[in-house]
Amino acid sequence: MLRPLFLLLCFALSFSAHGAGFITNLLNHPVPGGVAVVDLGDNDAAPQAFYQDKPVLVVRENKQHWIAIVGIPLKTAQGSQTLKVRDAFGSREARFDVGTRQYREQHITLKNKRQVNPLAEDLKRIDRELAEQNAAYATFTLRQPSNLLFDRPVTAPLSSPFGLRRFFNKEERAPHSGLDFAAAAGTPIQTPAAGRVILVGDYFFNGQTVFVDHGQGLISMFCHMSQIKVRVGDELKRHAVIGNVGQTGRATGPHLHWNVSLNGTRVDPTIFIGQFQP
């Protein structure tokens, strides 16, 4: 019980006068697939911020000081980026710089070739499921995230990091959009922060899947599950069990795939558990 209490205390301090360093040190890794923390200045009311025409997470640092927490797409080039800001003083721009990061390759052999080159009827299903999941990622509610320092959803070693260039049967596919944990089948999966269940499904690639909205575009997705124990609309406390580890969908063995999304962009979850490696 001491660690969750400590983490909650750290998050509470992030909104105190001494908290800017904590949030920045934890989350500010402005690289492709990373997160930028952008200073929005002092204001009585919360400003609004937009990146690439999408609303972004804004939190109060202390009494009147605000920051934006921005997810950076993997394909973003090195250089300056622009954030559009609206507040009581009008509209303005804030800028941040994006650096570089190299990602490794991963080669996977699948016996089920249909999961590498889907059939025509599979493609129709995949397109429908992708639209459904993208709509979930685009969810933006005004609720304040309960914490920004997440816990791991399972206690298990990492097996595949975020951002890997993936090759299935020697054919390149989309980069790895989250973290894989080498957890045994049946292992309970817990939410790393409080939130609301916004989507539950059984998908071609992801298998049994749950989306949790933590607030202001901060979304967790858990997939390849063997069992789901929540429903759409459920309000979850931190550490609530949402289901169990499995190998449904496109999976070569039991594991949990967890991804984190900000402003509709998948970002490296290690940032939120304090284990980011440049």
Image (cartoon, grey):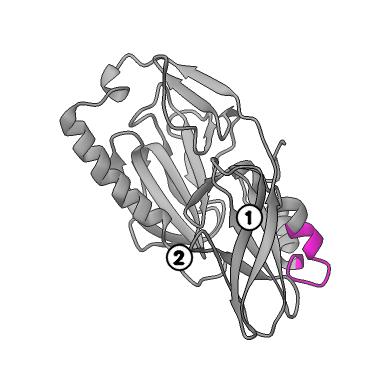
Element marked by disc 2: loop
Q: Is residue 267 left or right of residue 101?
A: left
Magenta segment, which residues? 13-23
**Residue bearing the label numbered 2:** 140
Disc 1 marks which amino acid? Gln
Mark 1 near mark 2, Cβ–Cβ under 8 Å? no
Q: Amino acid at mark 2?
A: Phe
204 with respect to 37 (left or right): left
Mark 1 crowdedness (10 Å alpha carbons): few <14, some 14-19, many ≥20: some
- Displayed quadrant of residue 102: top right
Q: Residue 205 lies in what quarter of the image?
A: top left
95 relative to 202 in the view: left or right:
right
Which residue lies under the disc numbered 1? 81
Q: Separation of disc 1 and disc 2 at Cα?
A: 22 Å
Q: In percent of the image, x 35 and y 63: which residue is there?
A: 233
In what quadrant of the picture does the C terminus appear?
top right
What is the x, y in percent for residue 276? 69, 40
